Amino acid sequence: MLLRGSLRPKASSNAGDRPLAQQCEPSWGREVTIEPEGFIPLPRFRFKQHLLDHADPAQQTAWEKFFRIVESLVHAQYHRQVLQMKEDYLVLHPQAAPANSSPQEQAAAEQRFLDHFFYMMEKANFRPLSQQQVEAAAREDYLYMLPLQIDWDQLDGEFLVRFYRQHPQWAAVARCGSYTNKLLLFARGTGVDRTQGWFFLAKLDLVITGLLKGMFRPLIWLGNLGKSTPPPEPPDDTSQAQWLSESSWPKTHIHQPRAVQRILLRDAVRTWRDWFREVEIQEPTYAELVMVYRLKDEQQHGCPAPIHIKSFHHIPQADLEVVFPTKRISMKPLDLVKLVTTGCVGLVLAASKLIFSAVLNPVLLLTALATVVGYGLRLIFQFRASVNRYHQLVTDAMYSKNRDTDLGVVLTLMDEVEDQEFREMVLAYWLLVHQGPMDTRTLDQECEKYLKEHFGLVVDFEIHDALGKLRQLELVQVRSQRWEAVPLDQALTRLYHWWNQAVEFSQEPLTP
């Protein structure tokens, strides 16, 4: 018997322990409130070694066996899902492993792969980003102060629309924003990035941008004259609907949320003195970011375009647009002013020379014309060189922040899911053994307190998920509304029983 209950999407009510689609709430302002999340960023080997160091020496061997069997059961549960996702991935990526798959087989593989992927993202404690977060990132700038635009027309969103239609249990994710019909963005964890420097050219960009906006504001007003502004669409309350098979858990955590101040360059430069000294800017980051998309122009020979999966780490929230695959980069205001100024001056001088040459000597007219054409080509090359420099800047920045791609993302995240399941189950059982019977809320608080005191982690522990798995394995029982752990020797006997059932085809069953 494997952990059947954990094969269903979990449900709860707090950030970090809520359903996947219920975590896509707008979060944007000068101050960002960070709630504890359910993910436990702790290596498995360190976690096991810590518990063994604090175990009774006479029971260390028994605890090592307990850890080994729990690891094996969790791995066996997800191993089948990994194999299925790998098979479907190869069907969807014929260039990786050529295969003669029919359109029906490709469509079925696409649906299975996305279904498993959504489930994996929820178990890994990722949350989809909201439309407000995506749009606000396009308006703000932190480190990459580049004029970027996203070409949404190059993204193929039909495969996501089909998936939402055929899998209504995940369709609530689509209500996080209209962008979810083109690509998917999931985030986990929040960090803080601080950068100190002079930012002299960036400060000049701020001034020039402000001046250009002031100059063109009347034209923009005239262009919008007569246009009616549609009223804002009311929020879709159904996005908060419960779409999971289990009911929400009344969940609380013991930690206080922390606030992170957003300090962009325009906030740091307040007085004229700030122009001539170093300033410090600060921005919340997405500790981990996963993106899923498909490009329209990659379809070949009747085969569907491959589904791309990218993972990044430590992406500033205001610079989110730099990770998009179909971004277009234009000129920065400072470079644009420099190019236009030098171009106008040069063309005026060349034109005057052209006129003067035509009057004096018609033969010199050809030389003057060549000078004008050469100067125009020089301006074009300067423009292309500036844009290429911007592209190289973004490429270099993303190289250090890129974690993995495509199937590597799936395999890495599945390993993290197994680690998370193991830590939750073992910690809950460990505390019940060492501290005695407890009710659900007390055990939840003790788990969070233990992680804070021993590892310095602020976590919203998913107690119901852990207790559900332990109860299915018959490692805990309820008496008088309190959870009680079975003795360690009995737990080992039951774990061996479940393991032998899971591998009943084996000729050498394990024995205590």
Image: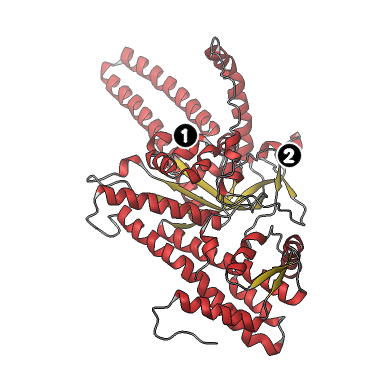
10 Å crowding of disc 1: few (<14), some (14-19), many (20+) = some
Please name whichever residue, 338 or 238, is drawn nearer the observer in this view of the structure: 238
The amino acid type found where label 2 is placed reads Asp
The amino acid type found where label 1 is placed reads Ser
SS state under label 2: helix
| Residue 348 occupies quadrant | top left
SS state under label 1: loop
Coordinates of residue 226 in the picture (x, y in percent): 54, 9
Please name whichever residue, 475 or 63, is drawn nearer the observer in this view of the structure: 475
Q: Is residue 18 left or right of residue 509?
A: right
**Residue 330: which disc?**
1
Please name whichever residue, 34 or 24, is drawn nearer the observer in this view of the structure: 24
Q: Quadrant of the C terminus?
A: bottom right
Task: Determine contact: label 2, label 1, CB under 8 Å.
Answer: no
Coordinates of residue 218 in the picture (x, y in percent): 59, 14
Looking at the image, tell me whether mark 2 or mark 1 is earlier in sequence order.
Answer: 2
Coordinates of residue 398 in the picture (x, y in percent): 50, 51
Residue at 71% across, 53% down? 251
**Residue 274: which disc?**
2
Residue at 38% across, 38% down? 158
Q: Is residue 202 left or right of residue 277?
A: left
